[in-house]
Every structure is written in structure tokens, then in C-alpha cells.
Image (spheres, helix red, strand yellow):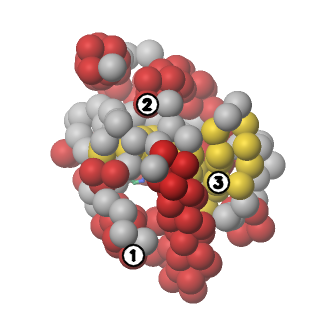
């Protein structure tokens, strides 16, 4: 795995396939442990991520860490990636053509990690990976099985910073994720 993973990371870090490379400081390949059953996928790097090269290290990332900790998970137990690996200027949504030109890297990451569970953080990831009409407020926390992987869409932590009233609903989703991880661990025992 490591050789393939390192080669993919090196290719990603040199990528100039879409115009986002022109304004990036760092490519954000992802963070956490690729030897995992559980992957989280966000939208794209923000300012702090662009500056540090690490996924979810700004305020949204700190909130994500709190939600993970609340269900006894941490970054050493999960992998965290993004739909696009370079920051869209002013944190705008990635354009469909940027997502399409980047998605090959995410596909390869999924192929190498072989997660059993993928959690889409927010609309951009859920619409691209689960269902183009996905509505986070209505469909968050629902499991959808595709190609042997259980997918769930939940609130993006940046959306929770804007709408803290949705945090209890997000916590319910994280409890479901924890239960699914426990099931996997019981199967392996
Ligand atoms: N928001 C995202 O979607 N991804 C990050 O890495 C940081 C903030």
C-alpha cells in the first residue's frame, strides 16, 4: 500500500490539471490514517488548510475533531480527504469541472484505502458521491450502500459553525457512525 500511496500523493502534489493550482500555497492531499475502514470526505481546503497543507485544521476542522472525540474517535482511526485538493479562492464552492478534474485522486485514495464506510461532510461531497439531489437537512444520517461501501451524508462542520442549532442532529449522525464502526470491529473479533 505505502508505495502506491506515496506515488499517488506525489502525483497529486504536482498536479496542475485545473486552474486551482495557480492560487494554491499547498496541495492538501488528506489527513489521518489510510489504514482504516472509515473515511470522511469534505469539500476542499480553506485558508488554514492551504497554508499548512493539512486537511481540516481551521475552525471547521477543530469542530470535526470535537465530534470525533465525542464518539471516541480521533484522526489516528480515520482518514479525512476532500473533493478537491487545492483551495478554491475565497472559499467558494469548487466548480463542477474542478471537482471532475480532481476526482481521480479521490477515487485512487478510496481504491487504496478500501474503506467500509464513507461519510460525506456537506452538500458538495454528498451530491457528488451519494446522489446529485442530496439534501443534507433531510437525508443526513441515512445509510446508503453502494459497491460494498456504506455511505452517509452529514452536516459540514463549517455549516454547524454557522448554524449551531444543527449540532444535536449532527451528533446523532456521529453516534450512528460510531455504532457502524463497533459493528465492523465485532465482525473482525
Ligand atoms: N473544509 C473542507 O471541506 N475541507 C477542509 O479540509 C477544510 C475545511
- Taking the spot 42% from the left edge, 71% from the top edge, the residue there is 71
SS at circle 3: strand
Of 128 and 35, the residue lying toward us = 35
* Residue placed under numbered mark 2 in the picture: 113
- Taking the spot 44% from the left edge, 16% from the top edge, the residue there is 17
Q: Earlier in the sequence, mark 2 or mark 3?
A: 2
Q: Position of residue 139 (x, y in %)?
A: 75, 62
* Residue placed under numbered mark 3 in the picture: 152
SS at circle 2: helix
- Taking the spot 26% from the left edge, 14% from the top edge, the residue there is 3
Q: Position of residue 44 (x, y in %)?
A: 44, 44
Mark 2–mark 3 contact, CB under 8 Å? no
Above or below for 126 versus 14? below
Q: CA distance from mark 2 to mark 3?
A: 17 Å
Q: Is residue 137 left or right of residue 1?
A: right
Query: Can the viewer see residue 87?
Result: no
Which is more foreground, mark 2 or mark 3? Answer: 2
Q: Which mark is residue 70?
A: 1
Of 114 and 102, the residue lying toward us = 114
Query: Can the viewer see residue 140?
Result: yes
Q: CA distance from mark 1 to mark 2?
A: 24 Å
State the count of labels. 3
Q: Is residue 42 left or right of residue 15?
A: right
Q: CA distance from mark 1 to mark 3?
A: 18 Å
Of 82 and 37, the residue lying toward us = 37
SS at circle 1: helix
Amino acid at each position: 500500500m505505502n508505495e502506491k500511496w506515496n506515488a499517488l500523493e506525489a502525483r497529486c502534489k504536482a498536479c496542475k490539471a485545473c486552474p486551482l493550482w495557480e492560487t494554491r500555497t499547498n496541495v492538501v492531499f488528506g489527513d489521518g490514517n489510510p489504514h482504516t475502514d472509515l473515511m470522511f470526505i469534505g469539500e476542499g481546503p480553506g485558508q488554514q488548510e492551504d497554508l499548512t497543507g493539512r486537511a481540516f485544521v481551521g475552525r471547521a476542522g477543530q469542530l470535526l475533531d470535537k465530534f470525533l472525540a465525542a464518539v471516541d474517535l480521533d484522526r489516528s482511526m480515520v482518514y479525512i480527504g476532500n473533493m478537491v485538493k487545492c483551495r478554491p479562492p475565497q472559499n467558494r464552492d469548487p466548480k463542477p469541472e474542478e471537482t471532475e478534474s480532481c476526482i481521480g485522486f479521490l477515487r485512487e485514495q478510496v481504491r487504496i484505502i478500501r474503506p467500509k464506510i464513507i461519510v460525506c461532510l456537506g452538500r458538495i461531497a454528498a451530491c457528488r458521491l451519494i446522489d446529485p439531489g442530496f439534501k443534507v437537512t433531510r437525508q443526513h444520517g441515512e445509510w446508503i450502500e453502494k459497491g460494498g461501501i456504506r455511505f452517509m451524508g452529514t452536516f459540514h462542520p463549517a455549516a454547524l459553525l454557522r448554524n449551531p442549532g444543527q449540532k444535536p442532529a449532527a451528533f446523532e449522525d456521529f453516534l450512528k457512525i460510531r455504532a457502524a464502526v463497533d459493528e465492523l470491529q465485532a465482525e473482525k473479533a
